[in-house]
Every structure is written in structure tokens, then in C-alpha cells.
Image: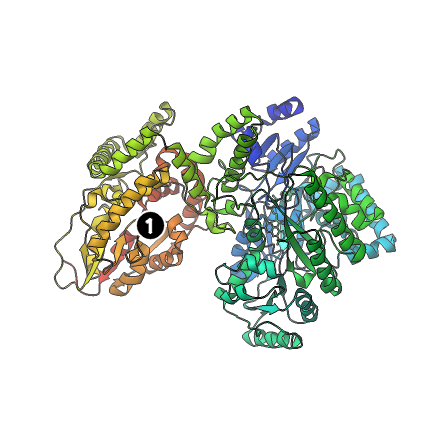
Amino acid sequence: MKGNYKKFYDDIKSTIETSRLYTDQIRNLAYGTDAGFYRLIPQIIVRAMNEEEVQKALLLANKYELPVTFRAAGTSLAGQAITDSILIVAGKNWEGFDVLKKGEEISMQPGIVGARVNQILAPYGRKLGPDPASINSAMIGGIVMNNASGMNCGTHENSYKTILSARLIFADGTVLDTGSDESKKIFLKSHASFIQKIEHMRDRVRANQTLADRIGYKYSIKNTTGLSINPFIDYFDPFQIIVNLLVGSEGTLAFMSELTMKTVVNPKFKASAMIYFHDIVSACESVVSMKPGPVHGAEMLDRIALRSVENADGIPPFIKDFPEGVTAILVETLANSKQELDDNINEIKSLLKDYKTVRPIEFTDKAEEYSKYWDIRKGVFPAVGGLREKGTTCIIEDVAFHLEDLPQATADLQELIAKYGYKDGVIYGHALEGNFHFIFNQNFDKPEELEQYKNFMAEVDSLVVDKYDGSLKAEHGTGRNMAPFVKHEWGEEAYQLMKEIKHLFDPKNLLNPGVIINDDPECYTKGFKTLAPVHEIVDTCIECGFCEVNCLTAGFSLSARQRTVVQREIRRLEMTEEDNERLKELRKGFDYLGEQTCAGDGLCATSCPVGIDTGKYIKYLRSLNMASARPQKQSQWVADNFQKLGPVIRGSLKFVNGVHTVLGSSLLDVVAGGFRTLSGNTIPLWTSSMPKGANAPKLKPAREGNPLKVVYFPSCIAQTMGPAKGDPYKQPLHIVTLNLLEKAGYEVIFPEKMSSLCCGTPWESKGFIKHADQKSSELEAALDKASEGGRYPILCDTSPCLYRMRRVMDEKLKLYEPVEFIHEFLMSKLTFTKLDEVVAIHANCTTTKMGLTPQLRTVAEACAQQVVLPGEVGCCGFAGDRGFNFPEVNTYALRKLRPVLNESKVVAGYSNSRTCEIGLSNNGGVPYQSIIYLVDRVTESKCYALK
Ligand SMILES: Cc1cc2nc3c(=O)[nH]c(=O)nc-3n(C[C@H](O)[C@H](O)[C@H](O)COP(=O)(O)OP(=O)(O)OC[C@H]3O[C@@H](n4cnc5c(N)ncnc54)[C@H](O)[C@@H]3O)c2cc1C
């Protein structure tokens, strides 16, 4: 860090703690990535927490004349969320909201994820207007600043149409809240000439009929090329003009710290149909015919797009056999009643009666069916990107035509893609709005490949602008990618107006310079990412960032996407031997930020459109680190002598529990924390939520007449760890489970030599795959014998252990997780009496991956009057035993837990993994125990009264 950056850093340190200012190589690289195909490496990353911090950063940037870029979720595609200067990240920690007017409006901070807003609005029957396919990951700040839109919102419900007011921080640090009269009054005084200039531009545009008409025409379809200049004709009030100028401004005009939007009705009755046409032109013509009808959305998927998703869950198998050319239109209709929905479907069918379709038109109104279609549609881009050849860059373009031009323009586009030899080029998208994306995979290794790309883009420009007067960017924003083409699309006069706006808001050109307005005609061909192949598990990653909502270390150390980014760069440096020092620093930094702090829970895969489990990749890296003789020998010894560990663990836990009794909880926490600090964090953190040792499980004699049999395998953790000192239920889990099973009429069978058995998870998570498999094979053999070859069900009381068992063991073994077993077998055999208490439940990562959260809720709701499932708490990050050594990961992952528990007055929490429960109790402030305790407490046998 040199010159003014050093001065900036030294100054900002007094306002923002250094743990939120990054300047190291590894994080600079990791944050230099958004979902687009460009990379810039920032000098300083500022993880701002509040307005004052952003204001301070902007004032200093202004003082030292340093460019600043803002970042929400970083899912932008056109190179607008990256910088080689200062990056201000305002995502996590900016997630506040306030529902207004019974859900008709909502105020939000910029870091709240779009899908979360829709969850909040669902009980009011409303949702956000803008609906980008990335809504599960994109944050409202980014959605508004890109004027992102999607499959159904068109131009009538996008951010531009639904924004009401905003709180802004300008480049000079001034704050304006256009929703506050007081703030506007102050701004009018301090920035009178600014407002006059806005009014002047407005009056000039309105007086210029040709320009006003052009603006009207251009925005009659989706358009995010250039700055939004329509506010001058759509609004009169200068403050409203300012707010709407901000929409789609891609962080080039001001920072938005809060905004209020109108919401839209989310009709209850919905139906969709995937309609297959013989060719792309007739598919587009059908959309023109449907446009006047009751159609809410019509998405096109060309033959290659269909091929990219043909193995997705929910896609009909017959798609694979379609001939070339078959094109699908996914149609949606909405209604307020069933009758209206049926009428809509009939009307759409009648609008399409003259079209020949490959299969009869079939609508479905079943949410579980149509939502799969829409998920498949949302996954096209990443799926195509995931299929690309190694080393190529997946490029997505985003054009719009006036609807009447769509059939011919699409045919032209298809021809153009073929002319340039992009064999895997795909066209798909929002046909109803004349907005198509096309994706192609480009190599940039040789000069002629770059030339090919430039020539292709020149022809795209000419086709879209000169031939059809359409939009070069319809919804993804201009970014760096389309900046050189803005003037050609809009013409000189409109372009000069955009420059004038930029100059007014940002006279020193410090806010995201080079984005939207860029004088370099070649800027779109510079700074491409390199995607060196690293391992087959992650090679298909397109760095879209969808994993980050489920990656518990996103915003703490590195996210799943960032882990891949760093590994790719390490690999590139290894291959090129370009910069050894940098390579060393990246490797060193990755050890903690990338490897040690990854929980390996694999939840990232659940939101990755191509299912990449970065946790699995990290475990693979761990296995490389553990490949040397010494750790292998140690691991082998533990695997071979596992039964010797139980008494040792029990003994130590009992010893510490004794210390706990003497010291009390507060003192134990302080003393243990002190020891850990003194050891340089090498000894695990012992807390008051740590368990006591549990006595080894023993079977009771079977109750006579119990007709059912179950094999019960208490995990090694349940065999050794009992409840914590302050837990409400004092018995070890295996005793309570035996009690519950007996109550429900089961005779329990233990596998032989149980104390030596383990599912292998502890080895797997550390990268000792061979020993993990050795342990799971031993367990499998014992379970096979105990269950008489799969005749009896097998219950394991710990969800993560069961998850691994299910992955690696023979399917003939009927393996059950506790919630699943209770739900499927015990509920009908027990009488439940609900507790008059508020209880929390935690679906750990494996419960989530096995899709058992609904069952967990059902079981808990049978037990307690009120059940809280904290909405924004995902994997706890304890990760088996990792939470003992890296408790900071656990604390970060559960940072939102305690406020929800306090607010809901929760008295106890329930889950189904003992180590997760330690972390949950520590960070939630209420004891967490297995759901089995709760069920046992509130149930009685239907078969007999227990004595
Ligand atoms: C697979 C995939 C599918 C996509 N599908 C769609 C789609 O259907 N429709 C669509 O429109 N887009 C789509 N996108 C693009 C992208 O997801 C959207 O544009 C999204 O709205 C960006 O939101 P974000 O939170 O990631 O913002 P970011 O990428 O972080 O930022 C977006 C822009 O806003 C600026 N910014 C962020 N926060 C602020 C703030 N507080 N104040 C001022 N400026 C700020 C940034 O500087 C940047 O220029 C898709 C992307 C991917 C990867």
C-alpha cells in the first residue's frame, strides 16, 4: 500500500477497526471478483457497518482523490461491482427492514437479500416488484442499483417503478433522505445549485420533444444501457428525480444506505406450462400472440438451453429425445380465484390454437411442480456455464427488442452466433418483454480469439442498435462491458446528458469510475478473469456467488466462491511461475482463511446452481495436507484403538465438569478463555456449555410384549458426552432414547462392540478419507449383523453421523435420523401433551441437506405451544470438533441467533447433533439439547403406562 492509499488507511483506522479493513493479498484477490468475467484487485476493502463509516470513507476518498466502488452481494455480471481502488462492502450487517402500511411498502437497508424480503412480505400476500433470477442471493442495494429485473416484473414492476424514497450519501459525504421533509429542507439550503441543475436538466429534456420521445421509446422496453434518464420525463419533483436517477446507476452517483419501496400483490392462484414449439421463430411468434392475454411471464429456452438442464430434478425425461430446434416457452398466469385461473388457461390456449406444438399444452397449478420449472429456468445460465470447456470464459449478454421485432431479431441473433462458430451459444430469457440473454464460451488465450470476440460484439451492437433500435443491456446493467457502446445506442445528445448527470453527482469521478461512462473504447476487452483448472469438484464454478447465502464464513474469512477464486489464482501462479512471493502469501493466507475456517458442511452446494460442494473440495485439500506419514500413523492408531478413547473422553469431561462445579459458569468461561489465549489459541475453548461425561450405554432387558425391533446406534459422541451442567435434562441422550423407544413399543438391539464403532465423520472432516472409510465399513458390518441384513430399521441419534452413513452404506440398511424416525414411526405410537413454552429448533446442515426441516418442525410443534425456527441462522459452524478450536467461526455463524431467541422469549432449544448443541447453547444463551429429550418429556405410551 503506497501513497494516498496508505494515508487513507491510516486515517480510516481511527473510525473503523482494522479487522474490517483488508489489505492482504488473499482478500484483495477474493473481493476482486464478482459474478462477471472481469477482475480488478482492490487496494483496500472496507467492510462498513453503518452510515457514519461509509460517510467517513467517502470523505477520505474525496480528500485523497481515490476511486470507490460499492458492493452488495457481488452477483453483477457486467463488471460493475469490482475496482482496483477502494471497495466498500455493505452487505451483511445492512439487513434491517421495516414493514409499512400492512406490507404495501417496505423500508430496507441495502444488504438484505431479495428472497428474504419476499419471505418477510409473504404473510401480507405481497412481494417485491423486481424479480431477478438471482433473487435468492442478490441484495436489494444491488438489485436497485442495477435496476435488475426478471421473469415477470417487466418494466411495470421493476425497481424504477416501485422505489419511493431513499437515503443517500453523496461523494462529498452529504446525506440526503428523500423520505424526510426535514432532510430535503436542509439539502435545499446546502445544495441549492445542485437542485437547480436537476430542474434545469428536467426542463431542457421536456422542452426537447425529439429527446423526450426517444427516451419514451427506449424505455418502452427493458433498458439498463447508460444512466436512467427517464426520471426527467416521468417525474417533476427534483427529489423524486434524484431517487429515480439512482436506480440503475450502478454505484456511480451515490451510496444508498436505505430505501423504501412499494410492494406488489402476490396472487394466490398460479399456473404454469412448459410449451414446446418446433422452432425458435414460432416460439417467439407465440409470445407476440400471447402478449395481450392474461400472461404474467413467458420465458424462452432454446434447444441448447433445454439440453443444459435436461438432467435437472423435475424436468420431464422426454426432453432428451427432442430433435434440434425445439424451443420451450415457460408460461405463467396468475389469478385471484380458481375460476379466474381456469379462464386464463383457456384464454391462453385459445390464443395459441393456431400454433403447432411438439406436445399438447398442459398447465399445472401445483406449486411443487411449477416451482421446479421456474427453478430450472433460473438455473440455465449457471448450468450452461458449468458445461463449458475448461479454461474458457462464460460470457452472458442481455439484449432487448421491441416485441414485434422479436421473432426476426431472434432468428438473426441465432444466425450471428452460428456465424462466429459459438457452437454452445445459448439463447433464452424473458420473451414476454422482448429480452433475451445469450451465453457463449470464449477463450482469450490467443490474439485472434480476442479479435473474434470484438468482431462479434461489433456485429451484436449493429444488429441490436442499428437494425432494431433495441437495448444492448436490458437488465444486467452497463458495467464495463457495455460502457463503450452507450453513446452509439443512445446518440450524442442523450449521452451528453448522462455525462452531465455524472459530473453533477460526482465531479471528481470517484464513484465507480469506468462503469457506465468510459472513454476507453476497448475497456470491455480488458481485465478478463483467468479460471485455471484446480480440481473437478470446483472447476465448473462460474463464480456467480449463489453459494454465499449458505456459506457461513462469507463475510468472516472467505466464502465458498472466494475459496475457489483463490485456489484458481494459486494454480495459475504455480503454472506460470510468475510471482513466487505472491504465491507464497496466497498459500499462507489460505491456510486459515480458506482451509481451517471452512466448516465443510456442504450447504454451499444447496444453493449452487451446479451443485458444487466446496466443503468437499476443502476436505480434499485437507487430505493432501494430511498425506504425510506422521498424521497418517496417528490417525490409523486412533481408528484401530477407538474403544480406548471413550473412557478417556468420559474421564476428561467428568473432570472438567468437576472444575465447573467448583468454579461456576462465569469463572469457568473466563479461566478457560484465558488458558486458550495464553496458548495462542492452540488449546480448544472450554465453555460452560461443554458436556459432562456420559456413562457407557447399557441395554435394559426387553419389555415383554414389545412387538417391534429397532437397531439403535448411539453415535460415539452420544456414547461419551452427556448433558452440560446447566442443561434442563440431566440424563445422557442414549438413556433417554432407550426410554422413548421402549415407550413406543420397541425392543432395542445394539450393534456388537459398539464402543469401537464410528461412522467415520471425524476422519472425513480432517481429510483422512481412508480411515473414515475403514470406520464406516466396520460400523456397516456391525449394523448389517444387528439388523439381520436390513430387516430392522436402524436409528442413529446424531444427524451428521447418519448423513455420512447414508452416503456410504449399502441401501439395504434402513437408516434413520432421529427426527425422521420419530416422525415416521413414533408419533403414531405416542400421546403428546404440548408444553406451554416457546421452544427453538435448529435444523443443522445435515438435517437441511436431507430435507428434514419440515419434519423437525412438525415434531417440535407436536411438543410445544410455540416453535421458533430462527430464519436467518443456517449451519452453526461447529463442524464436529472444529468449534472447539475455531470458536470464532461458530460465534460468527450464530451471530443472529441470540436476538431472535430473546425477542421470542425462547426457554430452550432443540436440535439433533450434540456438538452443534454446544455451540448453539454458547451463542444462543439458552440450553440446546436433542429433540429426543423434548419428545420423551411430553409423550406417553399408547401401549401401556411405564412404571
Ligand atoms: C446466475 C445469475 C443470474 C442472474 N439473473 C439476473 C436476472 O434475472 N436479472 C437481472 O437483472 N440480473 C441478474 N443477474 C445479475 C445480478 O444478480 C443482479 O443485477 C443483482 O441485482 C445484483 O445484486 P447484488 O446484490 O449482487 O449487487 P452487486 O453486484 O454487489 O452490486 C451491483 C451494483 O450496485 C452497486 N451497489 C451495491 N450496493 C450499493 C449501495 N448500497 N449503494 C450504491 N451502489 C451500490 C455496485 O457498485 C454495483 O455497481 C444474475 C446474476 C447471476 C450470477
| Residue 136 shows in the view | yes
Q: How is the image coloured?
A: rainbow
Q: Position of residue 813 (x, y in %)?
A: 28, 56
Quarter holding residue 518: top right
| Viewer-proximal residue among 416 and 689 | 416
Quarter holding residue 639: top left
Task: Tell me: 97 left or right of 661.
Answer: right
Residue at image point 36% right, 40% down: 765
Task: Tell me: 14 left or right of 881.
Answer: right
Q: Is residue 699 above or below residue 637?
A: below
Instruction: Describe the element under mark 1 as helix, strand or loop.
Output: helix
Q: Position of residue 530 (x, y in %)?
A: 60, 38
Indicate the amino acid at tag 1. Answer: Val
Say which quadrant the C terminus sits in: bottom left
Q: Report whether the residue tagged 1 is closer than 8 Å to ligand 1.
A: no
Q: Is residue 329 above or below residue 212?
A: below
Say which quadrant the N terminus sits in: top right
Q: Position of residue 842 (x, y in %)?
A: 38, 50
Residue on which the image places disc 1: 808
Residue at image point 74% right, 46% down: 455
Q: Position of residue 303 (x, y in %)?
A: 60, 61
Task: Tell me: 524 left or right of 844.
Answer: right
Residue at image point 50% right, 68% down: 366
| Label 1 CA crowd tier, 10 Å (few <14, some 14–19, many 20+) | some
| Viewer-proximal residue among 36 and 526 | 526
| Residue 911 shows in the view | no
